[in-house]
Amino acid sequence: MNIKRRTAEPYKIKSVETLSMLSRTEREESLKRAGFNTFLIDSQDVYIDLLTDSGTTAMSDAQWGALMTGDEAYAGSKSWKQLEQAVRDVYGYEYVLPTHQGRGAENILSQLKIKEGDFVPGNMYFTTTRAHQEMNGATFVDIIIDEAHDPSINLPFKGNVDLTKLQALIDRVGANKIPYVCLAVTVNLAGGQPVSMQNMKDVYELCQSYSIDVMLDATRCVENAYFIKEREDGYGDRTIASILKEMLSYSDGCTMSGKKDCLVNIGGFLAMNDEELYIRSRELVVVYEGMPSYGGMAGRDMEAMAIGIREAVDDHYIEHRIGQVRHLGQQLLDAGIPIVQPIGGHAVFLDAKAFLPHLAQEKFPAQALAAALYVDSGVRSMERGIVSAGRDIQTGEHIKPNLELVRLTIPRRVYTNNHMDVVVDSILSLYEKRDWICGLKMVYEPPTLRFFNARFAPLAESGKLIDEENKVKQIS
Ligand SMILES: Cc1ncc(COP(=O)(O)O)c(C=O)c1O
Ligand SMILES: N[C@@H](Cc1ccc(O)cc1)C(=O)O
């Protein structure tokens, strides 16, 4: 008999947190209070929280144990030494500075490197990263391959940079107007898509020939390493740790949100090999974050992060992590639900344009779908479409991204595959009722990073987001 052997979690559960299970009416009320924005729903009203994989990790017993050993000294904390050493060992950069989270590092890097009128190329934008670049006077330029903007194209390395786009930008504006290339591994908004080792090498070589730095957004770099092991020739027998080290060697430094691939609930860092940049960054760390020996983190947080950095490169951990995301995504694909392909590293992304073709993009289909999913089952997801893209800084018009997505983001080591199955069932049932889901109008719009706090209302006259009783087919 040909038995397909299954695998299970490479950990067992030592402590549990009870989930709240509201009635549908209670969820409808909660959503209304939240202005139909899943960011504004109280977490106690959520059953399965797939809003983000950021800071939502379950820590290991070793990490919890280490909290007690945290050195809370204002200066020279020994916990900082542990963290610094872990970054040096696992990531390979010479200089490290702690920050309270990823955007703390983005702030410092952008302030130091960007001058008014500069251009920062990147493989698709990320909200906070672009906000810091723009606040410092730069224009973000997207240099990701075109295919990344099409949810249905299946490519192994859909996060790759199009080198002709990078070369064209250098030719157009000149290398001296490009302070650095911001290379994300993986690419969050493209669907958690990886960059190949070859592409990282090529970008680095091209940049070196023009003395342009390559600064990684290393937030999900371990997930990227896994895809290289799985998909790129010559890496199948290598450890994740060695692939990761090689990846980062094709860069001059990185910003890191420790809340993802460092397996902790808070923290981040800025790392680099250039001593001069390090000294200047240290000056800003004391202004914005705290002493360079804690940077906004408690000593106990740094102890936990030092351990998380090493745990994340365990081959069994990462194989299960990516496997769980696929467990969710593959069932949706098999059932014909439109999702971004291939399935990425940290999340499954529903293609809201294809799910709700009756809603024009100005009616916020991804926002409406995320809200409808919450009503259906208490599963919280996140809009990643026109609301997240914001407005063009020049024209003030909505930026209309090709990708209008709902992100189902899987926290690390938190949920079981049974939870994933519940999510699948809810999405399948919603797909059957999709015609009855109406669009939204934005009734409050904050000026920056609007998706966090914006408020919406249903466009349907009934005021109902899903009119199941009357089965009213919604048209745009
Ligand atoms: C790709 C990427 N870069 C940067 C950040 C910023 O990190 P943080 O949330 O820790 O500030 C995030 C998440 O916010 C992210 O997903
Ligand atoms: N980086 C986290 C938290 C976050 C969410 C949305 C943002 O636009 C910014 C930050 C995430 O991607 O989930």
Image (tube, helix red, strand yellow):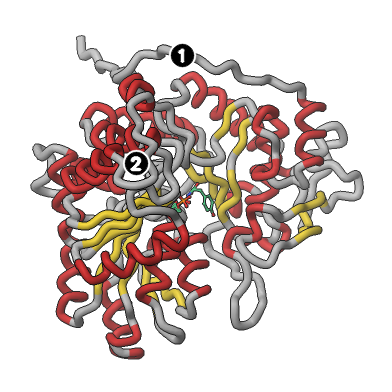
Kind of residue at disc 2: Asp
Residue 261: numbered disc: 2
* Quadrant of the image containing the N terminus: top left
Q: Separation of disc 2 and disc 1 at Cα? A: 22 Å
- Please state which of residues 64 and 316 is positioned toward the viewer in this rendering: 64
Q: Nearer the viewer, residue 241 or 286?
A: 286
Q: Quadrant of residue 121?
A: bottom left
| x and y, in percent, of residue 169 in the image | 34, 83
In the image: residue 199, left or right of residue 429? left
Quadrant of image for the C terminus: bottom right
Residue 474: give x, y in percent of width and height. Answer: 79, 49
Q: Secondary structure at mark 1?
A: loop
Among the 4 quarters of the image, the one containing residue 216: bottom left
Specify the amino acid type for callout 1.
Ser
Identify the residue at horizontal 46%, vertical 71% (top origin).
Answer: 133
Q: Report helix, strand or loop for mark 2.
A: loop
Q: Residues within 10 Å of mark 2 (few under 14, many from 20)?
A: many
Residue bearing mark 1: 15
Q: Which residue is rendered at x = 26% and y = 31% of the image? A: 311
Q: Are marks 2 and 1 in contact (CB under 8 Å)?
A: no
Q: Is residue 3 left or right of residue 335?
A: left
Crowding near the residue tagged with mark 1, few <14, some 14–19, many ≥20 C-alpha atoms within 10 Å: few
- Above/below status of 112 relative to 198: below
Residue 199 visible, this angle? no
Measuring from the top left, give residue 182's x and y in whole percent: 34, 66
